[in-house]
Every structure is written in structure tokens, then in C-alpha cells.
Image (spheres, grey):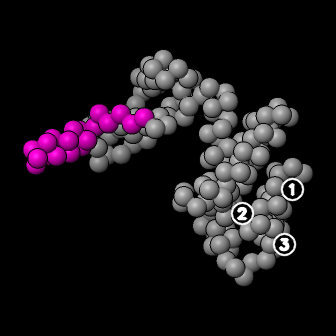
Amino acid sequence: MAADFNTIARPYAQAVFKLARDKGELAKWSDTLGLLAAVASDERVHPLLASPRLSPDQANALIRDICGEHLDGSGQNLVRLLAEKGRLIALPALAEQYEALRAEEEGTLEATIVSAQPVDDKLQAELEASLGKRLKRKVHLTSEIDDRLMGGAIIRAGDLVIDGSVRGRLTRLATALNR
């Protein structure tokens, strides 16, 4: 996300998080914001939301029509407010920031392992437990495949990046040799 969208989204994410926490609806709002972010970042919808030709009322109607019954009254109010302020384009950043606030509240952390080969479930569970112990949080690890790594893996958990990939090692070796 662009820095300006993060800045725009921050107060909205904080307000929605406070509302969700106070009402005990953290998971419900995760679902709502996930849906809204997916709609706003869709390749057919995004250009419309970014267009100055689309009025706030039209933008509001567009999102509400697409989401239909999956958007309750609170979600509709958020969409209306963001449309009036011309902020619907920031929905993906808002959802991302909300999820970070929720994870902090719940003591969880989303992490990703990128490897050249698929990671089996046993190893993934061991990595989750090890990272959880190191970071003192419950870690949920998702895996991605990137055959450009040649071997090894890269783990990203918040600000922590552990690069144990062959490509990463070769890059560090080349940097050291060029000094």
C-alpha cells in the first residue's frame, strides 16, 4: 500500500477497531473489511473508485450493490462515510491496519514462509511453534512457493525477516566479495 493510503486509513482503522472491540465483534469486522478491501481492489472496481467522475453517492451505491446482503448496517455506514470523504480507495489499507490492530489485541501474528518447494504440515507446525516461542505470540504461518529461491526459505513475521534461501546466501556472499 502507498504511504498516503496508510495515513488516510489509520484513523478509520482505529475507529472501526475500537467499535469492534467494544462490541465484541472483532471477527465480524475482519470479515466485513476483508470483503470491502477485496471489492475495492478488484481490477474492475478500483479504477472506478479512483475516478473523479464517480460521485460519492455513485461510489457508495456501487460498493453496496456489489456487497449486497453481506454488508450489515454498520458496514453500510462505513461505506457511506468513506464514500462521502472520497476514501473508498483506501479500503485495502484500512483492512490491513485493522488486522494489525486485531492481531496485537489478540496476541497473534501472521507470518509467511516462502520456499522453493512445498513445506509439509509437520514442518510448518514446528516453525509456527518455534516462531511463537521466539516472538511470544501465537503465530499463524502461511506458505508460498517461489522457485526462484533455488532452495531454502524466507520467513517474514511482522518486521522480522529470516532469509535462509540459497539466493539470499549467494547475494550476501557476492556483497561480501565486492567490498
Magenta highlight on residue 167 = yes
The residue carrying pointer 3 sits among few (fewer than 14), some (14 to 19) or many (20 or more) residues within 10 Å by Cα, namely few
- Residue 88 is labelled as 2
Looking at the picture, which amino acid does disc 1 mark? Asn
Q: Residue at x 61, y 60 (%)?
A: 5
**Mark 3 vs mark 1, CA separation in Å:** 13 Å
For the residues labelled 3 and 1, say whether their Cβ atoms are less than 8 Å apart.
no
Q: Is residue 53 above or below residue 138?
A: below
Looking at the picture, which amino acid does disc 2 mark? Leu
Stretch in magenta? 160-179
The residue carrying pointer 2 sits among few (fewer than 14), some (14 to 19) or many (20 or more) residues within 10 Å by Cα, namely many
The quadrant of the image that shows the N terminus is bottom right
Looking at the picture, which amino acid does disc 3 mark? Asp
Q: Secondary structure at mark 3?
A: helix
- Extreme residue in the right direction: 73
In x, y percent, where is residue 6?
60, 55
Q: Residue at x 81, y 67 (%)?
A: 84
Which residue is identified by label 1? 77
Which residue is identified by label 3? 57
Give the camera-side residue of 3 and 25. Answer: 3
